[in-house]
Amino acid sequence: MAARKPEGDLKRGWTTGACATAATAAAYQALVTGSFPDPVTISLPRGEEPSFPLSAAELAAGAATAAVIKDAGDDPDVTHGAEIRVTLRALPAGDGVRFKAGDGVGTVTKAGLPLPPGEPAINPGPRAMMAAAVADLARRLKGPADVEITVSIPGGQALAEKTMNGRLGIVGGLSVLGTTGVVIPYSCASWIHAIHRGVDVARANGIAHIAAATGSTSEQAVKKLYDLPDMALIDMGDFAGGLLKYLRRRPLPKLTLAGGFGKLAKLSQGHLDLHSARSSLDLARLAALAGDPDAAQKIAAANTGMEALQIAGPGLAGRVAAGAREVALAALAGDMDVEVLVYDRQGRLVGRAGG
């Protein structure tokens, strides 16, 4: 279950990529000058210049290692508090900047991600930030422009089990992420990014049928129904719009949308963001689908969508499924085969449309 957003102003944090860039800058300066800047200041793509205290600094023959502790601010990030370590070595002139996955950083094993299989899971954004930091310091300190950067996150393999990495084909640890370097607390961006990468991986690996679920109960039920591989499962959560708009540009042959009654009832009413803070279920509209005046009156006075389902029974769930399918087809505006499955809280299929 997603963490509840606290009240009041929220503190921003720094991405794993920003932390790795700070550690890279500190290690590079130590490699050239023999001393570590602490704190170390870096420039981010949008002009911010944050400073990071070092949690470790080691200088050995031909190598320098620096580390910072990630501060994700008030965002419930699984990597908050993790140590991001970088070991930097000089390479022969002309070798460029190379990246390696150390302990706790994953390796890409499947096509469809921004990096090819076999590459360390250090995304293009952080790579560009680290390479820019090296180029700037090489120019100012007259040091080597060609270096090997090894990024490690101790304990990262265990933390990665709480992410979608395994499903995306990233094995052995976490991904180093971040395009701006800044973590905005409770942003939708990281979840939608994971949805998009899930679609990309499925497409690149020849998956013709994907299933997107609003939660774990419906995901397990649809996985069992179709015996789908993990690569075909998309953790959609509340972001139906994020999925459907992406599939509109990158369609697949078949899409199954699976979820609880309340979430899919909101989709059937045209909401593409299903979060309770950003959309609400219109019980009066839902009551109009009941087909029975007494049931309609009770549904209009119900407290929740699940109570409405208990009043009206599976017939209402079937009509909600049909309405949700129409909204999805309109958002896709293509020829995808779309099916909608409505589940109750026990994981029982109570409504179905399409397929």
Image (tube, rainbow, N blue to C red):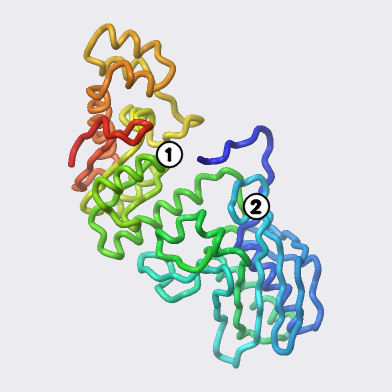
Q: Mark 2 or mark 1: name the one nearer the start of the chain.
A: 2
Amino acid on which the number 1 mark rests in the picture: Asp
Label 2–label 1 contact, CB within 8 A: no
Label 2, residues with CA under 10 Å away: few <14, some 14-19, many ≥20: many
**Residue 158 falls in image quadrant:** bottom right
Give the side of residue 329 with respect to residue 26, left or right: left
The answer to whether residue 109 is visible is yes
Check disc 2 and report its element: helix, strand or loop. Answer: loop
User: What residue is drawn where x is 38% and y is 56%?
Assistant: 198
- Image mark for residue 56: none
Q: What is the total number of numbered labels drawn onto the structure image?
A: 2
**Residue 20 falls in image quadrant:** bottom right
Q: Nearer the viewer, residue 63 or 103?
A: 103
The C terminus: image quadrant: top left
Give x and y (percent) for residue 247: 31, 50
Amino acid on which the number 2 mark rests in the picture: Ala
User: What residue is drawn where x is 71% and y is 60%?
Assistant: 49
User: What residue is drawn where x is 50% and y is 73%?
Assistant: 120
Give x and y (percent) for residue 278: 48, 31
User: What residue is drawn where x is 43% and y is 39%?
Assistant: 238
Label 1, residues with CA under 10 Å away: few <14, some 14-19, many ≥20: many
Q: Nearer the viewer, residue 191 or 346?
A: 346
Residue labelled with disc 2:
72
Residue labelled with disc 1:
238
Give the side of residue 247 with respect to residue 157, left or right: left
